[in-house]
Image (cartoon, helix red, strand yellow):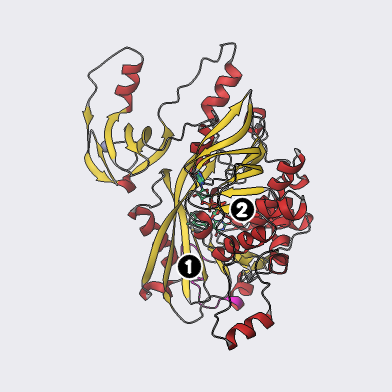
Amino acid sequence: MRLACPCCGERSLDEFTFLGDASVTRPDPSADDAAGAFHAYAYLRRNAAGPSDELWFHNTGCHAWLVVTRDTRTHEILGVRLAQDVALARTGNRKDVRETSA
Amino acid sequence: MAGQSYSIFSVLREALRGHSGWGPAWREAEPKPRYDAIIVGGGGHGLATAYYLARHYGIRDVAVLEKGWIGSGNVGRNTTIVRSNYLLPGNIPFYETSMKLWEGLEQDLNYNAMVSQRGILNLYHSDAQRDAYARRGNAMRLHGVDAELLDSAQVRRMYPWLDYDNARFPIKGGLLQRRAGTVRHDAVAWGYARAADRLGVDIVQNCEVTGFRIEGGRCTGVETTRGAIGAGKVGLACAGNSSRVAAMAGLTLPIESHVLQAFVSEAVKPVIDGVMTFGAGHFYISQSDKGGLVFGGDIDGYNSYAQRGNLPVVEDVLEGGMALMPRIGRVRLLRSWGGIMDMSMDGSPIIDRTPVDGLYLNAGWCYGGFKATPASGLCFAHLLARDEPHADARAYRLDRFASGHMIDEKGVGNQPNLH
Ligand SMILES: Cc1cc2nc3c(=O)[nH]c(=O)nc-3n(C[C@H](O)[C@H](O)[C@H](O)COP(=O)(O)OP(=O)(O)OC[C@H]3O[C@@H](n4cnc5c(N)ncnc54)[C@H](O)[C@@H]3O)c2cc1C
Ligand SMILES: [Zn+2]
């Protein structure tokens, strides 16, 4: 498995560290159901068998956080985006989302 | 009761007649339309659960449904280490119960599982690590578990060939549990399968559960690749695939699936007679009776259902091995493989009811569930039969993440790839 960092190009897996599911988002702490929402945010995972969005960090490279779309059944990399771009796109403050695929 | 008992006499008799008289160890069962209890997953835990249900709790109308063949999952992929050297109160009694069940397992099952109490030695390399092991050893002894803290001279008497005076990671001693050891993993699956079968349990292979029948909030059966099967109670023991299977019942679990690799070398003469772990990198090793060095290290660290890992961890594990015992440098690697495990959010397992009535969960065993097999089977059977937790598994609740009662041996929080 190799990851194509949008900044550094295709690099060996041992340059990266894995954080986890990129689809979980921090809930609103002042919402009525905040306790339940934080439990789900901190502990419950879809853990999909198939394509998943994951947060990876380019530890010994450019230090960018990445959203990697990867098939957990085959380890096939379906796309790598900068986490910053993904977050901006999510909040509507859209910059051009740079995308590479491996 | 089907099948013959194994004994010295049956072995001698069969030796004299060219082993022509052995029958199959268990029946090839066809699924019935309904069972009192269905166990999903024919790994060690599922088979042990069925056995103890029949043996201790009198529930014999039981089926174990396995999507592949029994032993094809982690029970046949692990590095066979059994031990009870845990630290936290929720864990020690459970794993010690398991250790005691291992000690009597072969008599109980009438099956040679090659239980070998060859001892496990966890090496330490710094004062801080010694203090941590002293604390662990004390916690074990307070619970009546054997533990000995060795200094480097004592370790040297056991293994004179280690790299003691390594400039960076000198070996200062180790925590020894003499009652720990190894058990032949396939024999555990086969032994439980045979013993459960003899008590009337149906072991149904090539039968994948594809859905649950849930009526009015109650699970009344399962859909499978071999048709629908009704059940009074359904227990999940699908190590590695727990999230996928539970999702079919609408549940989201505090679990990620990760791959762990293991390795075996070509057979060499006896070099290491116990189990040993390196404290300065992640590496552990023992030697099989065939002579192969069996070893492993860290999980790969990313979610996976692929049952295979990647090369960086292979390199990392082998480097750990070379740092600890440079003498293995010219031994050739024979095989490596991977298994998919449920990594839970606190590194500890779950044996509990679920929000769906009649559906029970046994999951989250991480990379340490082989040693748990007997106690997990016993406690899960207790829960299924009595609808209340076994005294030794009370802490393994599904709601502990919401209530804050985590059992985090490593103290790394909700980061499954670090446990
Ligand atoms: C490389 C490696 C080394 C390890 N080393 C050790 C060790 O030294 N000591 C230790 O204590 N632990 C170790 N472990 C962990 C241990 O092997 C597991 O925690 C334990 O085996 C899990 O329980 P099990 O035996 O029931 O799992 P499995 O044998 O995996 O059983 C689960 C079964 O469920 C079946 N299943 C899944 N989905 C379905 C479905 N939908 N329908 C029907 N069946 C289904 C699977 O096919 C599988 O057979 C190791 C694990 C690995 C991968
Ligand atoms: Zn980069």
Quadrant position of residue B313: bottom left
Residue range (magenta): B158-170
Closer to the camera, B196 or A24? B196
Please, is residue A88 above or below residue B256 in the view? above
Q: Is B223 on the left or on the right of B11, as rendered?
A: left
Residue B415 seen in the figure: no
Residue B290 seen in the current view: yes
Q: Give residue B190's position: percent from left, percent from top.
A: 58, 63
- Chain name for mark 1: B
Contact? badges 2 and 1 (CB < 8 Å): no
Q: Is residue A3 left or right of residue B184?
A: left
Q: Residue at x 68, y 72 (%)?
A: B5
Label 2 is found on which chain of the structure?
B
Q: Which quarter of the picture shows residue B395?
A: top right
Quickly name the residue at label 1. Answer: B294
x, y percent for residue B159: 56, 76
Task: Find residue B157 and name its label.
Answer: none
Query: Magenta stretch: residue B165 in it?
Result: yes
* Residue appearing at x 48%, y 48% in the figure: B67
What number of labels is visible?
Answer: 2
Distance Cα–Cα, label 2 vs label 1: 33 Å
Q: Residue furthest bottom?
A: B16
Q: Which residue is mark 2?
A: B202
Q: Is mark 1 within 8 Å of ligand 1?
A: no
Q: Can you tell me whether the CB of the residue at mark 2 lies under 8 Å from the nearest atom of ligand 1? A: no
Task: Give the structural element (helix, strand or loop) at label 1.
Answer: strand
Q: On the rendered structure, is B60 left or right of A40?
A: right
Which tag, 2 or 1, sits closer to the chain's start? 2
